[in-house]
Image: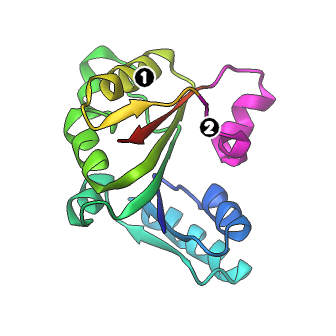
Amino acid sequence: MLEVEIGCGNGHFLAEYAARHPDTACLGVELKMKRCLKATLKLERLGLPRAWILRATGEQVLGQLPDGAVTRYHLYFPDPWPKGRHRRRRFLRWPNLEQLARTLAPGGELQFATDFFDYYLQGKLLCLLHPALELASAYPSGDIFRSVYGSFFAGKGRRVFSFIAHRK
């Protein structure tokens, strides 16, 4: 079983999640070197041998993963690129969704959370349109609130929008 968090930041969520799921292989993907180092130190301090950090873009990692290799993707609070002219930079767009679906195992899931309603609608619509994915009636567990942004938004009383999409 491999679970991937795209945009793991300083590794707060990944370290806690990997500690609670010791039999699961967890990969955190992050582009910024300082964040990768902080995340790696957290994993080492907790002695988590089945959790790793990879410095790369999400697109680079998706392109290298074999079909059906991932049981769950965690995509929590990615950069929303709120300006209309910047939306093409969002991670959750059709080419990446194609790769996410390809690399998900049958029954695998994509868990997504954001505080931007527009991004939530975009992601949900893309999943509805993708022939290999179906939206679940359930929502991601309270795990999303263990992320740095999830905790921050919950503390501020801000609304978080989330969904799960399963691979058919």
Quarter of the view holding residue 43 = bottom right
On the rendered image, what quadrant is the C terminus found in? Answer: top left
Residue at image mark 2: 140
Q: Amino acid at mark 2?
A: Pro
Q: Would you say 82 lies left or right of 130 here?
A: right
Image location of residue 108, percent across then percent down? 44, 51
The reply to whether discs 1 and 2 touch (Cβ–Cβ < 8 Å) is no
Image location of residue 32, percent across then percent down? 42, 60
Q: Residues within 10 Å of mark 1 (few under 14, many from 20)?
A: many
Q: Is residue 18 above or below residue 45?
A: above
Q: Residue at x 71, y 81 (%)?
A: 45
Q: Amino acid at mark 1?
A: Tyr
Tell me the CA gap for discs 1 and 2: 16 Å
- Judged from the image, the secondary structure of the residue bearing numbered disc 1 is helix
Q: Residue at x 31, y 56 (%)?
A: 57
Residue at image mark 1: 119
Quarter of the view holding residue 137 = top right
Among numbered discs 1 and 2, the one appearing first in the sequence: 1
Image location of residue 149, percent across then percent down? 64, 39
Q: Would you say 44 lies left or right of 90 here?
A: right
Q: Residue at x 29, y 24 (%)?
A: 87
The residue segment tinted magenta is 138-160
Does the magenta portion include 161? no
Q: Would you say 145 lies left or right of 94 here?
A: right
Quarter of the view holding residue 127 = top left
Image location of residue 143, percent across then percent down? 69, 46
Give me the disc on residue 143. Answer: none
Q: Residues within 10 Å of mark 2 (few under 14, many from 20)?
A: some
Q: Is residue 73 above or below residue 94?
A: below
1 or 2: mark nearer the eye: 2
